[in-house]
Amino acid sequence: MAEWKSNALIVHGEGKDYTSLIRRMGVYNPIRSKYNCWPDGEEFRNFPTDRILEDIFFRKSHKSDLIQMADFCAYALFRSEFPLPSKTRTHEGVGCSEEGAIPCSDHSPCSGKGNI
């Protein structure tokens, strides 16, 4: 954000209040190097969140389309990384064939019969 000279506002749904955490991170936000050492030899470097303009704005999620869309995207990404076995469809007995196959959600070839 600093490179683009951008600022941010945080709109948060109901739940835990992160206002004091965001305020502290504006002063001291230690980040560990993924290589265990920054070029100056230190293990941590302070990257304060100085581009957040205001304290967090809280909105009821059922009244905010923006928060509902963000929740949906976060849940979809989470489930794409950690799918529930009870919700994952299998293709056994569907009549899959290699010829003229179209890829299914799990990237296996399927004929498209009986798949949603």
Image: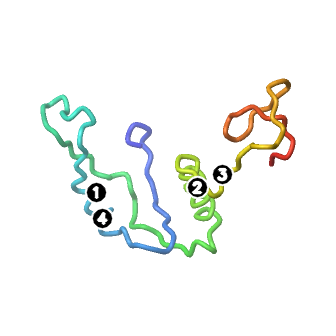
Q: Residue at x 61, y 58 (%)?
A: 72
Q: Secondary structure at mark 1?
A: loop
Q: Say which label, 1 or 4, has the lower sequence index.
A: 4
Q: Residues within 10 Å of mark 4 (few under 14, many from 20)?
A: few
Nearest to the observer: residue 6 or residue 28: 28
Quickly name the residue at label 4: 21
User: Outermost residue toward the top?
Assistant: 99
Q: Earlier in the sequence, mark 2 or mark 4?
A: 4
Q: Secondary structure at mark 3?
A: loop
Residue depth check, mark 1 versus mark 3: number of the one nearer the observer: 3
Q: Do the CB atoms of the residues marked 1 and 4 lie less than 8 Å apart?
A: no
Q: Alpha carbon of mark 3 to alpha carbon of mark 2: how far?
A: 6 Å
Using the image as rendered, state which of residue 97 and residue 58 is in the foreground.
97
Q: CA distance from mark 1 to mark 4?
A: 9 Å
Check disc 1 and give the amino acid type. Answer: Gly
How crowded pointer 1 is (Cα within 10 Å; few <14, some 14-19, many 20+) is rated as: some
Residue at mark 3? 88
User: Could you say which disc has been placed on residue 84 in the image?
Assistant: 2
Q: Is residue 56 above or below residue 3?
A: below
Mark 2 and mark 4 in contact? Answer it, CB < 8 Å: no
Q: Please report the residue visible at 84 percent of the width from the left and 38 percent of the height from the top.
A: 95
Residue at position x 12%, y 32% in the image: 41
Identify residue for label 1: 26
